[in-house]
Structures are given as structure tokens and as C-alpha cells.
Image (spheres, coloured by chain):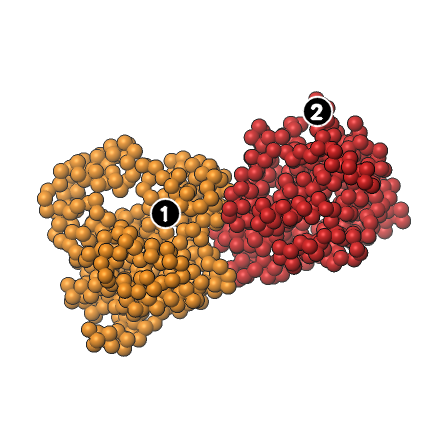
Chain colours: A orange, B red
């Protein structure tokens, strides 16, 4: 069986994602789709709307065949580390193609850009330093440095969020010399950062989350923007766990930590650098809400997402020690599979270079302990009796299993 | 002016406390009463029902003239460290007598017991070790070792809680050779640990707290057991801060910490010793509520209060480093005064060997930073908008000031 890999967060799964999966199979001729999915905390430094288990179920019911968890130490990271982890995961899972959505939609242009930047690497790094020295954030400096090099016309626009991520996937695959072919498709309609619904059925995950939180516990507003399985999955989550997750529910915990820790202790947390510990500590005492805190914390030097990632690391108490950076995942944590996915998995087991973990208790290392810690702390956002149930999922939950007939019926209906 | 010192928690102030103050003045002929009062966390390892400011106001309206905060690093401690801190505070505040309530009621018996135990010190310490080796808790071992020495008849019963504390006051004063006279009065009616109301007007603080929490937000049940100023003070606190404090409101925070910290990090917390960190970590993952956690945590080796103190130190993140034990307080944090108290204070300022702190921002050292951290974390138990207001009290609140006319009117009425 031929597998195409996708790097996803599904927060939550929507029609755009369904389109991506469909096109990925079409473009690559793959038999199955494997997702490297972030766990409970995401690249933007936010808790996922619903748990990794609920998001896995939505994905499996909508066309993905296998879902593996992208470990926390790659998932809550800047784009390049994130990309290295995700690509290494999909390669270990046997994908020979990886398909990502981008604003550009032209894979050749990604390779041109990669080669161009490799050629002018020293100059590029010099420019990046210059811009950072002027107080720009790292991603902004990357984009400005790229512009300063006056790139050729067949390059991509590196100021667009999905082009940036895609570029990092291409770079990770090239640098690691993985035998994997990269494919990109143009994103349809909704922009990543769209806050409002722009069309009748395609909406960004951002606008869907916004609608969910502005109509507390009433999810009917998003009905036409997500597949029925996402809609039911969200309904079930509300029923089973009482709430959707957002930063507001973790704010008291974060604030507590910032009242507890000394500057020296805070500096042991990953990404707490350059004196930001003092700003964090003095602002925490003054702010009543998370939005107020973020508003006051924000500077030109740090992007919003970088700051949120730092706060996520404080919340999950992820230290510099445990987050030692590597370029490859050390295990495949199986979150779920379809029947077809299971057949593929049986073959993969014979050749996979790293352990495949179906049962959390069967394996341990520092990286997976960090995942477990993050999953439990994610659960702390819920009120009881949901909280304790959610904490126990990490060791008790079996991988989600979806029989294929459901997918087949759907395909027939189409 | 002649001052008598009392060591108190006033959680909350009740008729028994009023009686204590009245008798203290009568027995010693003192003009004013000075209280060394625990801040927001108490010797039993519990949050106080209401803040130190609210408790100070109740005390000043009911006969105390000056209230100083017993620093956290003495207040949340086993009896002997607690006593050293409290006695050193009252001596620094110029008290020439200290009056405590006890089951015994006979001060000579305290001195006899002290001299007896000094005489047989080596044997006593040997017996304590023996009993601890058998798995008894420290206080229980003290009591059993004392019995094993077959004390003379004119000693006190060292298995009773107020006798134990009183004995430690006497010991602290003797060891430190303070020029202070110790006085004791027999406690009236209610026992320290009484859970239920035993008479129509005298009740233990324990039974008052129990009544408050079993009739959520309805405080009428305790009306006849506390002075009107306590009653109004509690009513005001509910209005101004939304809730009375207990361990249940801090349980999510404690649980978060126990999910966050590694055994090595947890061992840096004061009183986390002898492998208890592993029990704490593994139980926290399993327990839904604080009572369930305590029930499972309890062993013969540790008293309930010792365990609660350890948990308080985790909650306030009080490390072994910062809790370095000393026998003397290093400042007098003024929480409140009456008009008479202020006159006394003006004299005291000229001779006091340590700084008198009326304004938190005017002074800093490690000990007072720990108090401030504890006060702010105590505030975290409240919901917003009360939480932020309570956090800011630590630096914003002026010492409570009560004019004397109120007391005079009361005295006339009596």
C-alpha cells in the first residue's frame, strides 16, 4: 500500500481539511492517508479546542487512515523544529509522499526558493541577524531577510503562513535527505487567519473556533462549516467533557505559576530567554485576564505565537533540560486507525525503525513523558468530574478504531 | 505602657478569644494586648477562613491593640519553630508578659515539665528516636517519650494540644533567655478539636468553620458563637471577596503542581522528605478531591497537620532554600492598631531592635518575600474579580486602624 503523509492540527476538522485529504490521495495516487497530528497543545501555543482523541476520531471518520501524535517537543515549536519532527514522523511511518496546502500551490517554486536560500545562505543568515538586531521578531526577520536578497520570480512569497510551513517541510526533507516526495496543493478559499465566515461552506479553523466561543455551548452556528462527523464529535465532547478548551481556562494556573516561581526557576523553562522572565513575573501580578496579560506582554521582538508557546511551556512546566532539541521523533504514538489503516500498520510494524506505541504503558522515554505531562495538564482545564476522567485517558484510552464501511458508504454517496 | 503578648490565629475570632484577652489583661495588669498572628496560612497547614486583614480588624474591634504578622516561615511550622518565632516577635514588640491558654492552666507545672525534660534531655531524645524508629509521628513520639520517662506529678499532660504549644512557648523563652514572664490561663469549655457546638455561646474555631462550610454562604448558624464584630466581619468578607477559604479551592492548583514537578524538583520544597515526593506524585494523578487525596496520603508516620503543612509549602512553592530555619523574626509587619496601640507603637519605634513595617514596599528580605508570595497565592483561591483585588492588598493595604471610642463604649456596656 502506498501512503501519503499530511501534517495537521485539525482544530477542528473542517471542509477545507476534507478537500486537502481528497486532493492528496488524488495527486499522489496513494491508497491511504497518514496524519502527523499535534497532541493537545498546538504550534500557535494554544490548547486544542478538544482533545487529541476527539480530533483523531473526527479525522478517521473523514478520510484519514492513521493518526500518529506529533510529540509535544516538536508540536509546540517554531516552524522549523515543528517541520523536522513532522517530516521525520511521516517518513518513519513509511510515507513516500507528503502533501501540504500552501498559498503558492506550486511545488517547483518551493524547491527554487530552497535552493536559492541555500546558495546565499551566509548572506541570508547575515541579513536575518541584522533584522533581529533591529528588534524584529524571528519570523519577521526571516521574511525581511528573504526580501532583502531580492529573490527570483519563480520563488514563493515567504510572508504567507502556509508557504512558510511548506518551505520548512521541503527544507527538512532535503536536509535530512529523506526518500520522500513533496507535493503541494493550493489552499481553497479561506485564509488561515480569517476571523469571519467568508463563504457558505468553507471557513478557516480560526473563524470556526471564534464562532464556538462567542456562542457559548451553542454549536449550531458552525453546522454548515464542518463535516457532520466534526459537528457530532464537538457535540459529544461538550457532553462528555463539559467544555471546549481555550487559554482562558488555564489562566489561573499560569498566573499561579508566575506567582510561585523565582526568576531563576522560571529561566529553567524552555524558551524563557533574554530577561523575559522579569516581564512575565511583574505583569502576572497586575493582570486579571489572559487577553489583558497577552496585550501587555506583547512587544515587537516576539510574535504572539512565540509568546503563547513560551506560556504553554510554563503551564506544562517543560524545562530546557527535557526539551533538548533533536531533529527526529523517537516513537510513533498511535492515536487511531481505520480498518485499512490497521492493515497498513501490520506491514509497517515489520520495517519501522522506531517503536510504534499503541499502549502508553508499554514504552517510556523523556519525550513521551513530556507528552503525557502535557496531556494531563490539558485535562486540568476542565471542571470535575470531567477533569479526572480526562487525566486518566492518557494511559487508559485505546487507539481509536473506525471500521471502513462508514467511509465506503460515504464514498458511495459521493 | 505595659504590654501583654498573645499568640493567635483567630480563625475566626470567637467568644473564647475575647475571654482570653480579657483575662490576659486582668492577670498581668497590662495596658495593651499585642497579638502575634499567623498570616493567611496557618499552623495546621490550612488557608485561613478569611484574610489576615479581615482577621486583624475583628481582633482590633474585640480588644487587641496591635496585630503583627507572624511570618510564614514560622507560622506554617511544627510547634517548636512556631513557638520560637512567636515568642521572639512578642519580645521584639516589647511585651514583658506572654499569656497563653492551656488545658493545664498552671504555669508552675509548665516550668516543672521544662526543667524535668532538660534534666533528662539525653534520655528523652533517645526515647523520641526509639518511638520514631517504630514509625510514630514526631508529635506522638514526643508524647510517648515523655510518658516513658515517668514524669513527676506536678508536670503537665503533654498529649493535649494547647499544653504542647504552651510548653513550646515556655521552652522558647527559657532557651533564648528572654526577659519575659509567661502566664497561662485555663481554657474555658470548648476543646480545640471540638467539631460540634457544645454550649450556647462558647464554641471552638473548628466547629465554627465546620458550620460555615456546611451552610454555604449562610452564616446565621454561627451568630451566637462569635462577637458581633466577627459576624459582621465575616459577612463583609463574603460580600467583598466572594467566599471563605478552604483547601478545596486550592486543590486544582496543588494537583497542577503535582502534575508539573519531577520528583527532583518536588524535593526542593520544604518538608518534602523521605521519599514522600513519590507518594504525592502518584496519588495526585488518581484523586479527584482534596479530602480523597488526604485520606489516601495519610500514614502513621506523618500527622495530618504535618502533611497539610507540606502541601501548603508545595502550593506556596516554599523551598528548602528560602525556609532556612532561624529562631527569631527579622521584622515586625504591622497589620493593624487601635488608637492606644498607635501610641504604644510610637514609643516602641524608638527602641525596637528590628524594623517595624507599616508599608510593605518600604522593606524587603527573603522572609517577607515569602509572606508576600503566600498572601498572593492565598488570593488565587478566590474567583475574579475578587482575586485580583486580593492579590493587590499585599502592597496596597494600609495597616487597619480602629479608633478607641468603639472599645470604650463596649467597656462601658460591660
| Label of residue A309 in the image | 1
Relative side of A32 to B93, left or right: left
Residue at the right extreme?
B153
Displayed quadrant of residue A71: bottom left
Q: What's the residue at 53%, 42% (across, down)?
A: B389
Displayed quadrant of residue B70: top right
Residue A286 place in picture, x, y as percent: 47, 39
Name the secondary structure under disc 1: helix
Residue B65 visible (yes or no): yes
- Determine whether A279 is above or below A254 in the image: above
Residue A114 place in picture, x, y as percent: 17, 46
Residue B303 visible (yes or no): no
Dot 2, crowdedness within 10 Å: few (<14), some or many (≥20)?
Answer: few
List the residue tagged with mark 2. B346
Question: Label 1: chain?
Answer: A
Name the secondary structure under disc 2: helix
- Determine whether A229 is above or below B225 in the image: below
Relative side of B124 to A411, left or right: right
Q: What's the residue at 48%, 51% (across, down)?
A: B260
Between the C-alphas of marks 1 and 2, the distance is 53 Å
Question: Label 2: chain?
Answer: B
Q: Nearer the viewer, mark 1 or mark 2?
A: 2
Amino acid at each position: 500500500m502506498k501512503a501519503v503523509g499530511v501534517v495537521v492540527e485539525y482544530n477542528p476538522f473542517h471542509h477545507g481539511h476534507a478537500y486537502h485529504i481528497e486532493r492528496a490521495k488524488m495527486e499522489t495516487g496513494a491508497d491511504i492517508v497518514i496524519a502527523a497530528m499535534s497532541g493537545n497543545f498546538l504550534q500557535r501555543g494554544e490548547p486544542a479546542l478538544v482533545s487529541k482523541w476527539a480530533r483523531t476520531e473526527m479525522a478517521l471518520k473523514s478520510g484519514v487512515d492513521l493518526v500518529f501524535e506529533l510529540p509535544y517537543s516538536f508540536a509546540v515549536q517554531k516552524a522549523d523544529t515543528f517541520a523536522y519532527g513532522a517530516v521525520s514522523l511521516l517518513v518513519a511511518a513509511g510515507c513516500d509522499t507528503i502533501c501540504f496546502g500552501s498559498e503558492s500551490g506550486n511545488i517547483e517554486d518551493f524547491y527554487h526558493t530552497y535552493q536559492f536560500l541555500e546558495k546565499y545562505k551566509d548572506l541570508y543568515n547575515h541579513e536575518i541577524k541584522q533584522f533581529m538586531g533591529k528588534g524584529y521578531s524571528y519570523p519577521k526577520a526571516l521574511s525581511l531577510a528573504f526580501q532583502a536578497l531580492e529573490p527570483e520570480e519563480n520563488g514563493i512569497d515567504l510572508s504567507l503562513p502556509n508557504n512558510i510551513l511548506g518551505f520548512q517541510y521541503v527544507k527538512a526533507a532535503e536536509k535530512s535527505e529523506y526518500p520522500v516526495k513533496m507535493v503541494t496543493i493550493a489552499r481553497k478559499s479561506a485564509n488561515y487567519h480569517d476571523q469571519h465566515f467568508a463563504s457558505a461552506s468553507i471557513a478557516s479553523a480560526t473563524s470556526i473556533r471564534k464562532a464556538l466561543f462567542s456562542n457559548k455551548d451553542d454549536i449550531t452556528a458552525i453546522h454548515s462549516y464542518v463535516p457532520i462527523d466534526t459537528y457530532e464529535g464537538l457535540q459529544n465532547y461538550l457532553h462528555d467533557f463539559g467544555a471546549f478548551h481555550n487559554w482562558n481556562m488555564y489562566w489561573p494556573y499560569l498566573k499561579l505559576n508566575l506567582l510561585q516561581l523565582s526568576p531563576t526557576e522560571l529561566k529553567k523553562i524552555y524558551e524563557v530567554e533574554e530577561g523575559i522572565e522579569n516581564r512575565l513575573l511583574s505583569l502576572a501580578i497586575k493582570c486579571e485576564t489572559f487577553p489583558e496579560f497577552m496585550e501587555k506582554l506583547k512587544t515587537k521582538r516576539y510574535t504572539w505565537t512565540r509568546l503563547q508557546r513560551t506560556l504553554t511551556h510554563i503551564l506544562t512546566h517543560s524545562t530546557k533540560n527535557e526539551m533538548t532539541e533533536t531533529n527526529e521523533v523517537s516513537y510513533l504514538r498511535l492515536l487511531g486507525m481505520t480498518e485499512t489503516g490497521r492493515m497498513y500498520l501490520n506491514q509497517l510494524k515489520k520495517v519501522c525503525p522506531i517503536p510504534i506505541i499503541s499502549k502508553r504503558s508499554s514504552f517510556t522515554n523523556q519525550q513521551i513523558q513530556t507528552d503525557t505531562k502535557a496531556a494531563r495538564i490539558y485535562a486540568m482545564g476542565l471542571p470535575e468530574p470531567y477533569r479526572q476522567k480526562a487525566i486518566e485517558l492518557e494511559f487508559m484510552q485505546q487507539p481509536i478504531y473506525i471500521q471502513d464501511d462508514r467511509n465506503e458508504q460515504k464514498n458511495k454517496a459521493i
